[in-house]
Image (cartoon, rainbow, N blue to C red):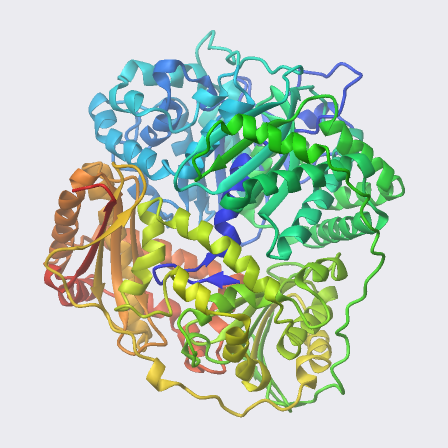
Amino acid sequence: MALKIGTGTGATSLTAILALAVSLAACQPASDRPEADVAIPTDYAFVHEVTDLPADPDIIYGQLENGLRYAVRTNETPPNVASVRMVFNMGSLGEADDQRGLAHFIEHMAFNGTTDVPEGEMVPLLERYGLQFGPDTNAFTGYETVGYQLDLPDAGDEAVETALFLMRQTASEILFDPEAIDRERGVVLSEERVRNTPIRRWNNAVWRFRLPDTLVPDRDAIGTTEVLENAQRERFVDYYENFYTPERGMVVVVGDVDPQAVIARIEASFADWEGLEAPREDPDLGTVSADRPISAGYFHDPEIYTIFTVDAVRPFTPVLDSAAARFDNNLANIGDAILSRRFATLTSSGTSPLIQAAANHGTDFGIADRASVLAIARPDRWEEGVAAVEQELRRALEHGFTRAELDEQIANLHTALRDGAEQAGTRPTSGLADQIWSNWRSDQVLTTPQSMLERFEATLPDVTPEAVSAAFRARWDGVEPLLFLATSVELEDPQTRLIEAWQASAEQPVEAPEDHGELSFAYTDFGPAGEITSREEIADLGLVRLRFANGVAVTFKQTDFEDGTVRVRLDFGRGELEPRAMPAVDIIAGSVFTASGLGEHSADELGRVLAGRNIGYSFNVGDDSFSFNTATTPGDLRIQMDLLTAFLTDPGWRQEGMEQFRAVIPEIRRNSYSTPGGVMSAEVARLIRSGDERYGLPDPEQVAGVDMAAIRDFLTPALESAPIELTIVGDVSEEALIEALAATLGALPDRADSWPDYAEARTVVFPDPVVEPVVLLHNGPANQARANVYWPTFDDSDPARTRAMALLNAVFDLKLTERLREREGLTYSASNAASESDVYPDYGYLYVGADVRLETVDQTYAAINELAADMAAGSISDDEFLRARTPLLERIENAQENNGAWMSWLSQSWAHPDRLDRIRSLRSDYESVTREDLVALAATYIAPERSWRVTIVPRDAE
């Protein structure tokens, strides 16, 4: 379900924006926290040394004499790559008041000069090995952790050795040259500006309310502008020397490597590392009271969602990770899932005061145990939303959970664990590397997926409604609720009103939930199985092409890249090109179609009917097709196809889908205008298409004008008759695939032999060049602005030309980073993209943009123009050309064994047969591009006088 409000390079999910609030409020990763009756060991390097949980035997753990921990694991998914991580068990919580933000600032300084790597050389060095700055070369800072990550597209000895060398330089050799610090201040301040969003401000406010007597509220990792602008070298060095110490660190290497050789390199690189003799200990974070009375907090921001949280906070009780602790935690997790499922049922109606709600529990920073419900409500109905949360939470605490509810969650969890065990052999290298260090940081044993499944199955007889209810209650009982409301509505005496709303609701009795019993899926018979009328093998690409008698066309690539995973894409109709009776019907259709369920099952009921099935049904209205995109397993492939066939033949068209959209769209609109980036998504996608109403965020009048009848009229012709094209990639046999398809899509009545091309709808016009930028307004802070430049280019009809432009874009990216970020400190991260349409003739663009201070907008435009002019004049060095092309070629090589890449390449290849040849020429096209080709493209397309520019500034700016 996608709402197309991007700038042409993606789509924004209706739930993705709201999910950000949930993720920010979620409990910190931690081990399970039931009551402890025994002393917990503390003298160990890794927790698996002192627990009954078996560590993954494929991971080799170790510790050097200086205290540095390491973990190495061989993994061949994908082949010939490796991921290297170095993390420290301290983050922004270790800062003094005059160091706020320096833990994160130091992360930046690691790329700005070390003893053996001069400033400006680290990133180019990595790019020559095929790493791209950002995706492959990155770092992160949290409250409790600082980490560095390198994903090597080539796991050769030289690349791994270089990666470890750079990690060693970062560990103790950062120079902190005062001039380099001053140059980087603008970059870090730019990042602070970009991150200064309503959600971040709410996040800081809610932590201040939850943990008022602790350091946490004053240790947001981004820090304060005062410190970032003024801190001198000695304050950086103080933090660095005290917290970048061997005994606090861990190095992880996972990939297609020889573990013993890697361990030898780690020892050779890090054995000489000596930290301070007496480094600073962990700070005293403060205290949490178990006796805090019922309390209320309030946060107002004109652009914030209405977010209500209720927390049960108590002092932290340490518990050793063990089988018993995990079982207890699992019971409480199931309780959270059932309560979240009840909230989902409420919100699915579209008439609830709640838009979204979920329950969770965990540990915060090793000082508090917390159970929580986070809900997003309609602003004008927040008191009803508070009551809905109170009553559902109390219903769970008073009456517990039903057998049917428990069975649904057990089925889902069992399936997830079983699939995880079956797919364990092809887990991606980067994910494994991150899992290893994160488990170390949370004092958890990294076991195998198979052992997790076995423990779960062994304890199933003890997973009862009574046990789950008791574990859930244990997280909430014994402390008073902490209530916090964030809203765009200004309230008088909000704390009193919030407590009164909660207590008034608590006086209303709640009934026990009904046990709905078992349900069965209504769509299992679509008639006699269809027959295959043609089959073709395309040997060089490893494809089989099938056509059923009813016209359904299939492209199938059997792979072993992801064990037990089958990726599915179903295309039909012409998507955005289809006739529409009114504006925005296409945009809204993508969001409400599946939310409206099926004729026999509401969307909410589908969750219960299909519990324990690894299936999905994401629906998208694309530029030139409607599509379902999902992934399943070989065992669930048949019911996955049953489900997709049911959506084609018996959509629900329920009003609740439309009501959900109408409830959430005002919140998306409000948040979109709170930052320059949000305005980009809401408006610029339409403007760069000269006002084409198929793009951008629909206005309130457009939303009000679309009803379910209009959605039905828009989609029904294609659903009933349009040719169907399936793309299947993954771990399933051809025989099993045909069996699943023949009984479902292959059994449908004959589809149309062809479908209108809608040539009249294939017109998109790039706006005329502008002398002065178009100006758009956002409602965020006064120091946030964004400068954007678009140059019209060409369509995607010539793949070699498209790939040359992609390479020019990659060179531009290098130059933007070096100029706007490193040299002038104008922005944390410049954005750029090349977009060539394969739907709209002659339409394409090259884009560059940056989040900057309002007073530097003109300077930013001047720098971009100068870079473009220099490239057009031939200023592309051989080194820049190499550093841009090498990562692209490495990605192509690795993509050959990636199911997602093959899905992208093969989708709609019946409708566009040339896509097969495009796969064959992918590498050779990039290899054949010359530096001179890029200069010629730059000279032709990115002259300043051809550009369309848009500046996004604060609403109150002059």
The C terminus lies in quadrant: top left
Depicted 497 relative to depicted 376: above or below = above
Depicted 409 relative to depicted 595: above or below = above
- Residue 551 visible? The answer is yes
Q: Nearer the viewer, residue 872 or 170?
A: 872
Q: Position of residue 172 (x, y in %)?
A: 39, 22
Q: Residue at x 70, y 49 (%)?
A: 341
Depicted 767 relative to depicted 111: above or below = below
Q: Residue at x 49, y 35 (%)?
A: 486
Q: Position of residue 490 (x, y in %)?
A: 43, 35
Q: Nearer the viewer, residue 612 or 64?
A: 612
Q: How many marks?
A: 0
- Residue 147 visible? The answer is no
Say which quarter of the image contains residue 684.
bottom left
Depicted 654 relative to depicted 538: above or below = above
Q: Nearer the viewer, residue 266 or 423?
A: 423
Q: Position of residue 138 (x, y in %)?
A: 40, 39
Determine the residue located farthest toward the top in the rendered image.
Answer: 278
As drawn, is 49 to the left or to the right of 285? right
Q: Nearer the viewer, residue 819 or 344?
A: 344
Q: Position of residue 393 (x, y in %)?
A: 71, 37
Say which quarter of the image contains residue 366.
top right
Q: Residue at x 25, y 25 (%)?
A: 181
Determine the residue located farthest toward the right in the rendered image.
Answer: 461
